[in-house]
Image: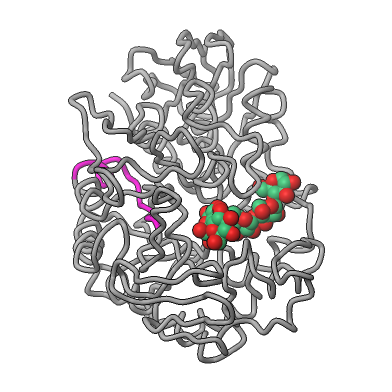
Amino acid sequence: LYDPNCNGKQVMVHLFEWKWTDIAAECERYLAGAGFCGQVSPPTEHVILPENNYPWWQRYQPVSYKLFSRSGSEADFVDMVHRCNSVGVRIYVDAVVNHMTGTGRSGTADGGSTYNSVGDARDFPGVPYSAEHFTPRDQCPSGDGNVNDYSNPANVRNCYLVSLTDLYGKLDYVRDAVAGYFNHLIQVGVAGIRIDAAKHMWPEDIAAVLSRLNDLPTDQGFPAGSKFYVFQEVIDQNDGAIKVDEYYDTGYVTEFRYCSKIAWGIKDYGQLSNLIDYGWGMARSDRAFIFTDNHDNQRGHGGGGNVITHENPRDYKQAVAYTLAQDYGFTRIMSSYFFENSDQGPPSNGGYSTADVTINADGSCGGGWVCEHRWNVMKKMVEFRNLVAGTTMSNYWNNGNAVAFSRGNQGFFAMAKQGSMSETLQTGLPAGSYCNIIDDCASSIQVGADGMAQVNINNYEEPIMAVCVGCGG
Ligand code: AAO
């Protein structure tokens, strides 16, 4: 439940809207060597909305648990999971099980299942679900049946989130159906899930589903007795009744306060000193699932807010570097596509068909894909985070313009907001010469017997020093 099953690796990348064939290739050509595991978009059959120009959020309106989506067929999905597993890259699925489609929708999904949620109909024969499997109207205290009062747990969890037909998680039938879907993923070799909209599900209903799950399959390389890794999307900004703590027994929780905190910290380095504020309710480190931005808040969905994204590359590199360098939580990196409006789907071949991710000669991506996870700083800092795993931050230093700390006696990190710094600092490292992995060893530090070193940074675009025992040249 709490072990990402990622073979000790400490970071996952969210390959938002990538096709299964591209992810399989990316596992083999990049993710395995760079030390990532990967989250993928919802694999289940979903509505298709030409009237909205095939938005990315189609996939958050499931029609059945058949594995047939805009990213590809079930055969493509299984091939991806197997190929990724065989090079040590574990896959996590974005699981949408709080609800099915929005109300008022009907049609046939891409895997062939029909759906009808018009009027009182709640027909999803592909599962199958029908009207009695959805939360009864009298359980929802809101006037129009939709979630509209975050101070009331019954409103948040029994009403319809943006008019999405809410599954009645109390029923054994629903718990069995959801567990059946998860056990299918497990059997294929998926290592874990993000539970979408977990805030809108009762924790006891999630626990009841998880109690029905099998161990991960040894034929996909998991040690016997391995459990499905679970992280739950609970947006807690201290502005409602639902707290992340309620979900600790069922897995990790998304820590959205971290997105705001790291953005403030990059704007004003002094703020980095109290980045993790338990007094403010932030989740304990061994339950916190953190990221600088996600697929919602990078485009103003889910409340949006002041987050730093790839659109400001210099700040974004600093935000991700710091996130990976410090020791709080389990980390995820975003891998995005460029967009002009917040509903826009992924790069396409026209209409519904998602375009291939193209890889340029210099290792960056083309065709409208951003591929933050392939940026130099991100790649190097993932290497750093994996190498210093298990150590804590110490020798913390911050003068408001530059910041530095060590990770046990394994690593040392420094970052300068204006692009340069020159300071004599305690590194916590054994005496010796260490080179900066960020600039491919163009710069280095000499650590004395007392652990002190002269730390110089002169690099405006990537003002970061990361050294570690056993990395670099
Ligand atoms: C689409 C259409 C809708 C239509 C619906 C059904 O846009 O108009 O009614 O179809 O036909 C995604 C899209 C939705 C889309 C949906 C289904 O974002 O636009 O709806 O697919 O296709 C809440 C939930 C959270 C949710 C988030 C979007 O708690 O679970 O809304 N995120 C997940 C996914 C997301 C997906 C869904 C759930 C649905 O990641 O991609 O939706 O499967 C507050 C609350 C939060 C709440 C936000 C937004 O937070 O605390 O719980 O999130 O508001 O309503 C400040 C604010 C604070 C705000 C916070 C957010 O602090 O003060 O109010 O920022 O960080």
Image quadrant holding the C terminus, namely top left
Task: State the residue in front, 470 or 103.
Answer: 103
- Which residue is painted at 57% across and 67% down in the image? 164
- Which residue is painted at 58% across and 77% down in the image? 119
**Magenta residue span:** 29-41
Residue 49 quadrant:
bottom left
Task: State the residue in front, 450 or 105.
Answer: 105
Q: If the picture is divided into quarters, which one holds ligand 1?
A: bottom right
For residue 123, side relative to residue 240 (left or right): left
For residue 168, side relative to residue 156 (left or right): left
**Percent coordinates x, y for residue 45 in the rendering:** 36, 68
Residue 68 quadrant:
bottom left
In the image, is residue 301 above or below residue 424? Answer: below
**Percent coordinates x, y for residue 87 in the rendering:** 21, 54
Task: State the residue in front, 421 or 27.
Answer: 27
For residue 57, side relative to residue 149 (left or right): left
For residue 260, side relative to residue 25 (left or right): right
- Which residue is painted at 61% across and 50% down in the image? 302
Task: State the residue in front, 254 or 353.
Answer: 353
**Percent coordinates x, y for residue 339 in the rendering:** 43, 35
